[in-house]
Image (tube, grey):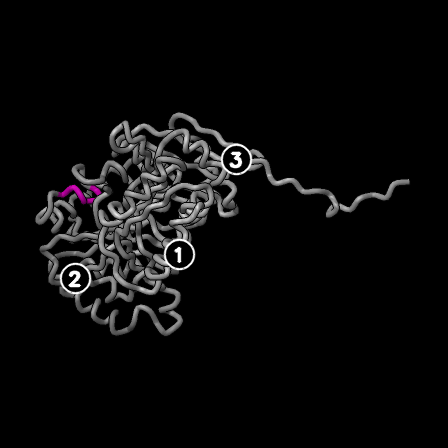
């Protein structure tokens, strides 16, 4: 009589991975995004569809499934001259450009994706994106192991506010800050009746977007620039955000604090709430009221409301106009632009372009984290395994 085998004695085969590439945006994008890190669950079908509608391009999507369940989705569009066969991840500059990948996906999922990507393009651009981005980190590891050239250029430092840490040290906001805010609110009220409210979810109507756009049209962006960087105007990126709000899940993440004075829109702060993380995308105000700091008053109200909704940290993206550090933000992960160039002669050519690509970015500010990144990148770049301010270019 044979002895029965225990379960642990059976040889375990690795999960079967299948790769597919479809014309257009794959429906599997939402299935992957739903199981991505909470900070990345806005990277849905509707997000990429909004980018295509607003900025143009024809997408293809490479998907990886594990035992029939999608674990990674990489939307790509052609970029640059046709002969270069360069593709990029579509999306909006704010808060970053990346692609969804399940939290439990391993590097093997991205390794399976690379051969199909190499058939579709010579090189892939990902970014601007944060250091530590889940999809980016797996892509870097897989690409270096498979002989792809990996190039990066520095875009900017990010700034982040750890509200949970600030509250552990005492009341936040501080009583002195609240006192100053009450003083400014009192004088701001001399201009008319103050109406503070929030917009999110089903509240995203054409009228709501028009209110934000109207404030931007009166702000310094319209006065000092060509207006193309505005988030909600027709000349700026308004088409993207209106299209993104058509996805009810994304609309539920989109959050704006709005101040009206005597019924007229006067200031706003616009964010994307992703789990316990708030991405601060834009804020603006009518300069007529600048003396009384309407933007700061509104954002403190916004942060207090965020605490009630479980927000523990705020990502303010690139740049620091002063108010971020005053509120308590500190330098966060660097934001970079990446090129992944397929193995062979293309990768060899890519190595020759490394310096030119890096110098096309900005000079990186010195920090321990930045120095560590450069050391790791240098160590992995020469061996056999080659490794919410600014334009969207």
Measured in 3D between alpha carbons, the distance from the residue under mark 3 to the one under mark 1, in whole angstroms, is: 31 Å
> Which quarter of the figure has residue 251?
top left
User: SS of the residue at dot 1?
Assistant: helix
At a point 21% along the width and 62% down the height, the residue shown is 323
Q: What stretch is highlighted in magenta?
A: 227-232
Q: Are marks 3 and 1 in contact (CB under 8 Å)?
A: no
At a point 41% along the width and 58% down the height, the residue shown is 310
Indicate yes or no whether the magenta region holds residue 285.
Answer: no
User: What is the quadrant of the N terminus in the image?
Assistant: top right
The image shows residue 233 at horizontal and vertical percentages of: 18, 40
Q: In terms of sequence position, does the residue under pointer 2 or pointer 1 come before the other?
A: 2
Q: Is residue 4 left or right of residue 209?
A: right
Residue tagged 3: 65
Q: In terms of sequence position, does the residue under pointer 2 or pointer 3 come before the other?
A: 3
User: What is the quadrant of the C terminus in the image?
Assistant: top left
Binning the other alpha carbons within 10 Å of mark 3 as few (below 14), some (14 to 19) or many (20 upward) gives many
Q: Do the residues labelled 2 and 1 touch (CB within 8 Å)?
A: no
User: What mark, if any, has residue 376 been given in the picture?
Assistant: 1
User: Depth-wise, is mark 2 or mark 1 nearer the camera?
Assistant: 1
Measured in 3D between alpha carbons, the distance from the residue under mark 2 to the one under mark 1, in whole angstroms, is: 44 Å
Instruction: Tally the numbered discs.
Output: 3
> 17 or 119: which is nearer to us?
119
Indicate yes or no whether the magenta region holds residue 228.
Answer: yes
Measured in 3D between alpha carbons, the distance from the residue under mark 2 to the one under mark 3, in whole angstroms, is: 51 Å
**Can you see residue 177?**
yes
Above or below, comparing residue 152 to residue 332 in the picture: above
At a point 11% along the width and 43% down the height, the residue shown is 226
Residue tagged 2: 293
**Can you see residue 306?**
no
The image shows residue 32 at horizontal and vertical percentages of: 47, 39
């Amino acid at each position: 009589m044979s002895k029965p085998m225990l379960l642990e004695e059976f040889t375990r085969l690795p999960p079967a991975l299948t790769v597919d590439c479809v014309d257009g945006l794959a429906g599997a994008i939402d299935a992957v995004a739903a199981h991505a890190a909470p900070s990345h669950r806005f990277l849905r079908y509707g997000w990429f569809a909004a980018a295509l509608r607003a900025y143009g391009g024809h997408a293809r999507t490479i998907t990886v499934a594990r035992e029939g369940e999608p674990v990674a989705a990489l939307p790509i569009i052609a970029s640059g001259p046709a002969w270069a066969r360069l593709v990029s991840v579509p999306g909006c500059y704010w808060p970053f450009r990346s692609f969804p990948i399940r939290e439990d996906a391993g590097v093997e999922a991205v390794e399976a994706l690379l051969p199909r990507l190499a058939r579709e393009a010579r090189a892939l651009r990902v970014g601007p994106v944060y250091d530590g981005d889940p999809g980016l980190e797996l892509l870097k590891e897989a690409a270096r192991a498979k002989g792809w050239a990996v190039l990066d250029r520095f875009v900017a430092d990010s700034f982040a506010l750890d509200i949970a840490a600030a509250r552990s040290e005492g009341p936040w906001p501080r009583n002195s800050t609240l006192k100053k805010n009450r003083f400014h609110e009192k004088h701001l009220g001399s201009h008319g009746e103050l109406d503070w409210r929030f917009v999110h979810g089903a509240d995203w109507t054409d009228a709501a977007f028009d209110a934000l756009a109207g404030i931007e049209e009166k702000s310094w962006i319209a006065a000092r620039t060509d207006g193309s960087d505005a988030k909600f105007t027709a000349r700026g990126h308004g088409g993207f955000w209106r299209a993104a709000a058509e996805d009810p899940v994304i609309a539920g993440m989109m959050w704006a604090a709005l101040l009206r004075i005597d019924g007229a829109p006067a200031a706003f702060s616009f964010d994307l709430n992703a789990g316990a993380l708030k991405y601060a995308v834009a804020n603006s105000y009518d300069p007529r009221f600048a003396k009384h700091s309407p933007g700061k008053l509104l954002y403190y109200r916004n942060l207090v409301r965020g605490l009630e909704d479980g927000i523990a940290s705020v990502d303010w993206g690139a740049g620091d106009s002063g108010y971020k550090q005053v509120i308590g933000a500190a330098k966060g992960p660097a934001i970079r632009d990446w090129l992944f160039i397929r193995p062979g002669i293309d990768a060899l050519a890519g190595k020759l372009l490394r310096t030119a690509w890096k110098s096309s970015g900005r000079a990186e500010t010195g920090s321990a984290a930045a120095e560590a990144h450069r050391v790791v990148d240098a160590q992995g770049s020469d061996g056999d395994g080659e490794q919410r301010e600014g334009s969207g270019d």
